[in-house]
Image (cartoon, rainbow, N blue to C red):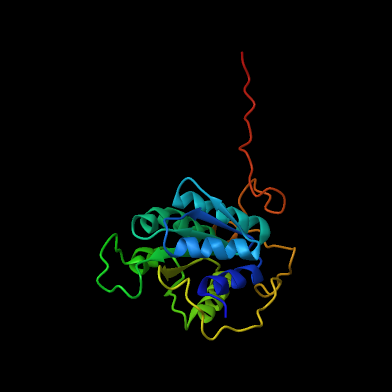
Amino acid sequence: MRSVADVLVRRLAAAGVNTIFGVPGGGGNLDLIAAAGRAGLRFVLTATETAGAIAAIAQAEITGRPGACLSTLGPGVASIVNGVACASLDRAPLIVFADAPPASASAFTHQRVDHHALLAPVSKWSATLTPETADVVMATAVARTLAHPRGPVHIDCPADVLGQAAHGDHADVAPAGALATGERAGHPRPLGRRGGTRSGVHTRRLGLALPRRRQVTRD
């Protein structure tokens, strides 16, 4: 039987995700990174949590697939808010995995913050994982982030859940090409602010563009 972390990664891979970005802090983050490695997905350590979210947004703009990032609990989630807000404003599909206090420790108070309330103004949807709901939560997260208007979704990952065996684990997963209506694998829709294309950005090639230099005329 697969672990909860393996179920999450399997759904990510099926959605076309090949990299997870972020700043781990232990707990469930490490289980997710280990599962990603077993499945052939890369983990890229970034300087800050917001940098991880923005890197994932850039990848989403290039590929047309969801971006994925992770953060530790409490201050880590507070730090990632700007990146999630960027995804919301840019209509970028982004899945945010936040480490959370152990589900079995109701009295856990260290760095406890209401992640759902903190991210609610800048995310489309939010949920907390359990071993029984892992597959359904991930399937819903992928569907919600890709549904128009696209945007970020958040999943709280209690530290003692990701290493547990997942229940209700389904063998068949939709292929990576099953994106939003009208899109095909290998033909991503250019993403930008409010669904448009950013000026000067070629999403199919680099996803980044340098500002044009102005011609300076000297007398």
The reply, left or right, for residue 97 in relation to residue 214 is left
In the rendered view, would you say 19 is above or below 102? Answer: above
Total marks shown come to 0
Residue, far top? 219
Q: Position of residue 55 (x, y in %)?
A: 56, 51
Q: Position of residue 186 (x, y in %)?
A: 75, 63
Q: Where the C terminus falls, by quadrant?
A: top right
Q: Position of residue 74 (x, y in %)?
A: 34, 59
In the rendered view, would you say 77 is above or below 217? Answer: below
**Front residue (pair 52, 31):** 31
Question: Does the image show residue 206?
Answer: yes
In the rendered view, would you say 16 is above or below 19? Answer: below
Q: Where the N terminus falls, by quadrant?
A: bottom right
Residue, far bottom? 168
Query: Which residue is located at x 35 percent, y 70 percent?
Result: 102
Q: Quadrant of residue 39?
A: bottom right
Q: Quadrant of residue 7?
A: bottom right
**Front residue (pair 109, 186):** 109
Question: Does the image show residue 91?
Answer: no
Query: Which residue is located at x 45 percent, y 52 percent?
Result: 49
**Front residue (pair 35, 147):** 35
**Front residue (pair 16, 102):** 102
